[in-house]
Amino acid sequence: MTLELHGLAKSYGGFVAVEGADLKVGRGTFLTLLGPSGSGKTTILSMIAGFTEPTSGQIFLDGREVTQEPPEKRQFGMVFQGYALFPHMTVAENVAFPLRVRGMAKAEREEKVKGALDLVQLSRFADRLPKQLSGGQQQRVALARALVFEPALLLLDEPLSALDKKLRAELQEELRALHRRIGRTFINVTHDQEEAMSLSDSVAILNHGRIIQLGAPEALYEQPRTRFVADFLGKSNFLPGTVREVTQGALGVQVGALRIRQAAGAAKAPLGASVLLSLRPEKIQVLEEGEAADNVLEARVVSWSYLGAGYSIIVDTALGPLRLAMSAWRAPFHPAEGAAIRLGWSAEAATIVEDDDVS
Amino acid sequence: MFPKGMPRNAGWWALLMPAFLLLTVFYVAPILQVLSISFTEPELGFGNYERILTNRSVQRTLMTTGRIAGITTVLALLLGYAVAYSVTMASERARRWWILCVLVPLWISVLVRAFAWVTLLRRQGLINDALMGAGVIQEPLELVWNEFGIIVGMVHYMVPYAVLPMLSTMREIDPRLMTAARGMGASRWVVFSRVFLPLSLPGVVAAAVLVFIFSLGFYVTPAILGGGKTLMVAEWISVQILDLIRWGFGTMMATVLVVTILVTLGGFSRVVNMRKLFGGGG
Amino acid sequence: MEGAYKPGWFARSTGLIVALYLVLPILIVLPVSLTDQRFLSLPRETLSLQYYRNLFSSPEWFSSILQSFWIALGSTTLAVVAGTLFAIAAWRLDRRLVNLMRALMLLPLIVPSIVYAIGLYRYFRWWDLLDRVLGVIIAHGVTAIPYVVITVSTALAAFDPRLEQAARGMGASLPQLLRWVILPRIMPGIVSGAIFAFIHSWDELVIVLFIASRDVFTLPRRIWDGINENVDPTMAAVAVLLVVFTVLLLLADLTVRKKRDS
């Protein structure tokens, strides 16, 4: 099912929860709405479901406008935050509910319920009450219940937020596999950037009620459009500077006392413009003696922590403190406080981003 | 006049309607209609209300009602506070018995209770019998068919209503506060008067409002235990309308009663959470 | 709880005395109903069941009890249906206008019944409902609505609103939602409300005094006449039966609540 939002907006009194969201989701896509709490992501989902009436704008499902339709007419499956399983019904009765309201015959209903429970590997628990299940099992029941009537669109509201970290990772895998297998449109809401990146074909990043950037996880990570996106997805160093030199495909950006060589990319940065560079910690190299790079900077280690797979290091430089990430395997040096090192990064490593940081 | 979103919520609004229509047609309408009589009978105007200033019987009834309601409120609060305090401090198991002691009288027929008091208090009643049998008194005491009897019966009726709001406030007080205060060397009395009492005051105010407004319009107990000699407002109204057929006069008093109650309630609505008082959910 | 704060002897004994004041006068009707004397008194020589025999062989008492029962049943049904639907819708809509309506629902608890009674006395003459069972059912039903609204609202306060969203999202219509999701969850609140509505009608006197006279003569009305005219120990027997009946209803309510809490 394709889903289109046209200028969808919602305000409560003077407070603008969602500001003119435009979105187009293709059939079979796994889209995640990602943002901090209060960014409007849940409101958008709630408007798609029909629980919240938009102040303005339109919603289309497969080209048919549903903006004014009540939720029960929209034919989507939904996994609620906290699951919202009916506590007075058994697992099987919960899963059967969407079929029952559609007046499906008992025999057919039982068969479908069995299929849905098999899909999430919970057939053994069919006669239990929800409160007798663990969090992860309840989550699977909610998923089975949302999928049992084979909706073309599945809405997921923070589906994994109530689970502990390990279980979350496990269910992410399952969710992703499930999506591949049944090939329906999934729309997921979360504030967890790792979950968004690992699950989605496409991620919409929201802040203050607006969609800041929409794209595949890699694109968002590699080419963040704004400072907020770069900061929210992973970690980044931000270097404010002024364009002093424009040559074919390359810029010379003055940051403090340093002239940085920077690939122009898609950004429009005329001579004299103030720009903000976003430099990912893992794209900064620790140079060995005599090694060269497009940009080279002397640094001193301020603090470091060992994370198993690598080190996270804070260094002090002429440009201020920087964060670097270094693989622990075959590390070029062993970090120690006060150690003097030489950093280098290529002209393509950093991205020019829009500075939308209001805080 | 319909709020936004009406068409989508039409089903829900329809569910409100049976109760709303029943209450409007069969509750509010008859009351408003009868109260309006006070301005139209025997003639149009405020003639009935002028009699508050001139008519002795009206003034006496208002005074009696105010006095009895006031005394009842004070006594019911004192007794109710003792009960609520005991319930709060009781162990889980004992608490169930306490609550039973409060809830059962609350729901026992007011007639049964008035009847029980008649049995106890009348001239040949159990109390006079016992006292005379023991030789404490020679002549039976006049315990009923006067203001004393009314107050005994009314306090008995009102104590449970006083207990409930006070109890719900007291149960929100953290018992560790009292233990802590004792630990800091405060005496029992100081703990009570400086810690517990101030924290429980909102419940006391709520209870006072509740008992007072219930007492003002009370009919059955004063009618039975007053024996027709001491008239409170409710019985006075009934006499005006059923015996004397003076509708304008009777409904004037009814209006005064309703307005007094609503004003009292409105005045305290800032202090007292009415929804909590009447258990409204949401 | 270990180290809990315990009240002193003064508070404890005062509380106990008040509890006795609340309960003893009601219990006194039991020995009085078993008296062997001809007037209201404690039994002197032996216990006697004569007044219970009196009561059960009296067609007047019997017909009043039956009439009260049917009226209470009718008005409870009315109050439960109207009150439950109202409480659910008010919970779901929850906006200013609805909260005003909710305040309106509480009026019967606040306005003295004497005021309503004189109002109905006049109003029902016009509707031709005076001294009719239907009239009393309506009057008792309307005044019992607040009890149902309160108990059902309390039950709904513990109801997760996402369950409603989930049901609607899965395609449930309003009647399906009510029947399969909301009503089963709040049934204990509805039963509590029904019990209180029943007791309310069963005990109601003031309204009946005004809108009924001959054809409708409920149990409270007969007790009222009994107290005002001839105080004989049969009244005590009636009182005992009423107390037992109310206590049984309250125990039923307690059981329902316990089930809900567990």
Image: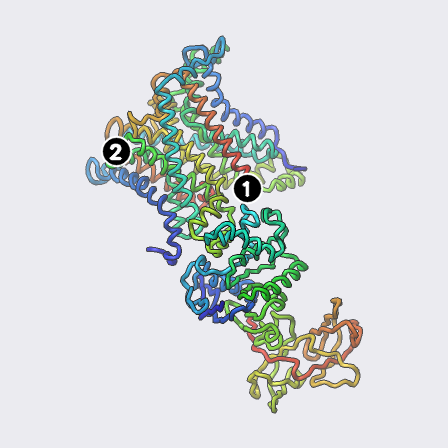
Number of residues whose C-alpha sits closer than 10 Å to that of mark 1, classed few (under 14), some (14–19) or many (20 or more): some
- In what element is the residue under mark 2? helix
Quarter occupied by residue C226:
top left
* Type of amino acid under label 2: Phe
Which comes sooner in the sequence, label 2 or label 1?
A: 1
Q: Chain of mark 1?
A: B
Q: Taking A7 as reference, is C124 left or right?
A: left
Image point (36%, 31%), residue name: C71
- Chain of the residue under label 2: B
Instruction: Give SS at disc 1.
Output: helix
Kindly identify which numbered label has been placed on residue B249: 2
Q: Residue A219: image x %, image y %?
A: 60, 76
Callout 1, which amino acid? Leu
- The residue singled out by tag 1 in the image is B199
As drawn, which residue projects farthest toward the bottom? Answer: A247
Residue at image location 33% in from the left, 29% down from the top: C208
Residue drawn 58% across and 36% down?
B192
